[in-house]
Amino acid sequence: MSESDVTREGVKGARPGRDAPADDAAGHGRHRRRRGRGEQSMVPEARFSSYYGKPVLKRPTWKSVDIAGYLYLGGLAGGSSLLAAGAQATGRPALARTAKLGAAGAISASLVALVHDLGRPARFVNMLRVFKPTSPMSVGSWLLAGYAPLTVVAAATDVARRYRLLGAGATAGAAVLGPAVATYTAVLISDTAVPSWHEGYREMPFVFAGSGASAAAGLALAFVPGEQAGPAHRLALLAAGLEMGAFQLMKRRMGLAAEPFGQGDAGRLLRAAELLTAGGTALAAVAGRRRGGRALAVAAGLALLSGSAALRFGVFHAGVASAEDPKYTVVPQRERLRTAGTD
């Protein structure tokens, strides 16, 4: 069997030590031919597999609740910080307070999820011993270490109604770091060898940016009175368009590596994400044009929050599924080699 036998449909050949000749004639290398019918295969069609069925990549050992939750909450926090700064600058105190509290709560819960996955807090502290600009994990750790205190200070000063200058500075600082917090996790997972994460490295940050902004808009729509929620309505429309557009573009460009996005748990979660995000956006648009549309706004907010969470969990599960099946690693590699003319 040569490497060229590996196709998207599977390997045309026998697995080592598994596929035996169908009869003695095949065992001696002779081929039966029937006049007018071409060569007849003497072995059954083989399913794609790696050596002895072993995965090519080690399956990610991250806990789905911890790490997918960490991805989601980081996006919610980053988007909320941007919304809080805008609300503060335009004189919408209820929106600003909700967004500040949302950012502080989300990033705190995100850190708890990360530390829980690491096993003990000391491991997160150890990640701060060095700073490596080429490592998304190192940059992300320092980003969280700087961003989380700013969100807490911004929220605390707003609730206490004291130290307004300090609070304004913390709100501005959190807004500067917010976009990076919302998207660096996309760079982090794309920097791995997991096929369905790595192949989406170009569009994944835009998907996460849209998802984070959509969640932040959802939080504001659910908890802020309608007269101050105008920016949240507009943000919901922009964020949903960015999230859904970038995700569809990413899947089209990824080819075979996008297949896990439509299968199993990942497929169900991502279909739910599309429905929730599209439905929440439509409700937000309707609620923004009606007086007394508070119930619609709350429904829109909850749908957007749920849609963003479903997207992050779906992306996480798709990556794990792609690592477990060796064809998502081997076939794209060979296609790239053929394209480059080196295979």
Image (cartoon, helix red, strand yellow):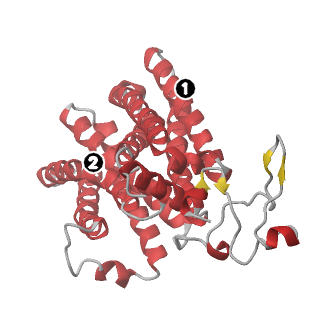
The answer, for residue 19, to whether it is visible in the render is yes
Residues at marks 2 and 1 touching, judged by CB atoms closer than 8 Å: no
Toward the right, the furthest residue is: 23
Camera-nearest residue between 218 and 28:
28
Camera-nearest residue between 174 and 128:
128
The answer, for residue 102, to whether it is visible in the render is no
Q: Is residue 121 above or below residue 74?
A: below
Expressed as whole percent of the image width and height from the top left, the position of residue 263 reads 65, 49
Expressed as whole percent of the image width and height from the top left, the position of residue 250 reads 44, 41
State the mark number for residue 179. Answer: 2
Q: Is residue 142 above or below residue 222?
A: below
Residue at the image point whose x is 43% and y is 63% from the top: 109
Q: Look at the numbered disc 2 and give the secondary structure of its residue.
A: helix
State the mark number for residue 296. Answer: 1
Expressed as whole percent of the image width and height from the top left, the position of residue 134 reads 22, 67
Q: Tell me the crowding category of disc 1: few under 14, some 14 to 19, or many 20 or more residues within 10 angstroms, Cα based.
A: many
Residue 173 relative to residue 292: left or right: left
Residue at the image point whose x is 43% and y is 58% from the top: 343
Camera-nearest residue between 282 and 38:
38
Mark found first going from the N terminus, 2 or 1: 2
Residue at the image point whose x is 34% and y is 77% from the top: 124
Q: Look at the numbered disc 1 and give the secondary structure of its residue.
A: helix
